[in-house]
Amino acid sequence: MDIKVVVITGAGSGLGASLAKKYSDLDYYVCLLGRTKTKLIRTAKILNHSHSIYEVDVSSKNDVAKVMQVIKEQDGQIDLLINNAGVGVFNLTENSD
């Protein structure tokens, strides 16, 4: 059986960490992507199977392209990509630019 590879952005906490656990339980190889390595390491500790950690800021198109190439070379073809990373702006609309 071929191992399937899932890439999850924002995997350091919240929904991303929960999805990482779920796909690990489904026997996927999980690639954890996020800005904070310590959070990614914490998520990795709850996984049941092999994984890799990539510290990256998804707001940088060049950095994302580099990481995706490294993942393909080191971990194999990506079967599933979950773009979970996001930002929050908490202010009144009229105060936003």
Image (cartoon, rainbow, N blue to C red):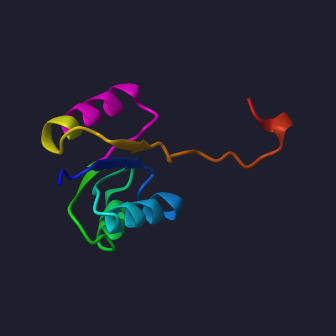
Q: Residue at x 50, y 48 (%)?
A: 84
Q: Is residue 63 above or below residue 79?
A: above
Q: Quadrant of the C terminus?
A: top right
Q: Residue at x 52, y 60 (%)?
A: 15
Q: Residue at x 47, y 57 (%)?
A: 16
Check the image and name the residue furthest to the left.
Answer: 74
Q: Is residue 77 left or right of residue 96?
A: left
Depth check, front residue: 82 or 70: 82
Q: Percent x, y for residue 29?
A: 25, 55
Q: Percent x, y for residue 10?
A: 45, 51
Magenta-colored segment: predominant secondary structure: helix
Q: Range of the magenta residues?
A: 55-70
Q: Quadrant of the N terminus?
A: bottom left
Q: Is residue 43 above or below residue 94?
A: below
Q: Is residue 96 above or below residue 48?
A: above
Q: Is residue 91 above or below residue 26?
A: above
Depth check, front residue: 30 or 94: 30
Check the image and name the residue furthest to the top.
Answer: 62
Q: Is residue 66 left or right of residue 90?
A: left
Depth check, front residue: 3 or 46: 3
Q: Percent x, y for residue 3?
A: 21, 53
Q: Percent x, y for residue 86?
A: 55, 45
Magenta stretch contains residue 62: yes
